[in-house]
Image (cartoon, grey):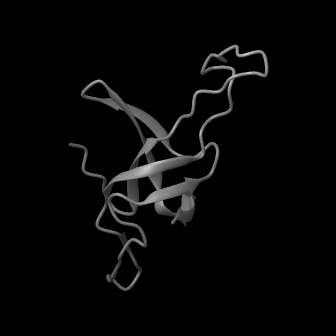
Amino acid sequence: MLRPLGDRVVLKAETEEEKTVGGIVLASNVKEKPTTGKVIAVGEGRTLDNGEKLTPAVKEGDRVLFDKYAGNEVEYDGEKYLVVHEKDLVAVID
């Protein structure tokens, strides 16, 4: 599995199939980029100037809201993931 470094977080973006009123399914490239995802892996945290580690505020399994154009998409083992900095996470969804 991917092991993020520093304050990075690996997410599996959640996508919903969207239908129009007439029942037509929209292609994924027509829809907006998803902004929610499930945390798959978390780095060990950001290193502060004094050498201390700032532990991440999220953990594996959390559902999160993230900035629309944040991170880098990567493909690993046939699955697509998004790697973002913790600062790009907006909220944890309960």
Instruction: Tell me if residue 77 comes above or below residue 67 in the rendering.
Output: above
Q: Residue 7, located in which quarter of the rendered image? A: bottom left
Instruction: Tell me if residue 44 comes above or below residue 54 in the rendering.
Output: above
Q: Is residue 89 left or right of residue 82?
A: right
| Residue at image coords 35%, 65% | 59
In-front residue for pair 37/76: 37
Q: Residue 82, located in which quarter of the rendered image? A: top left
* Residue furthest front as drawn: 22
| Residue at image coords 39%, 57% | 8
Query: Residue 40, percent across and down?
Result: 33, 50
| Residue at image coords 41%, 67% | 58
* Residue furthest left as drawn: 1
Query: Residue 14, percent across and down?
Result: 50, 40
| Residue at image coords 48%, 39% | 72
Q: Is residue 77 left or right of residue 48?
A: left
In-front residue for pair 69/12: 12
Query: Residue 68, percent across and down?
Result: 64, 45
Query: Residue 45, percent across and down?
Result: 35, 69
Give the number of callouts: 0
Query: Dividing the image into 4 quarters, which one contains the N terminus?
Result: top left
Instruction: Tell me if residue 70 comes above or below residue 90 in the rendering.
Output: above
Instruction: Tell me if residue 51 comes above or below residue 94 in the rendering.
Output: below
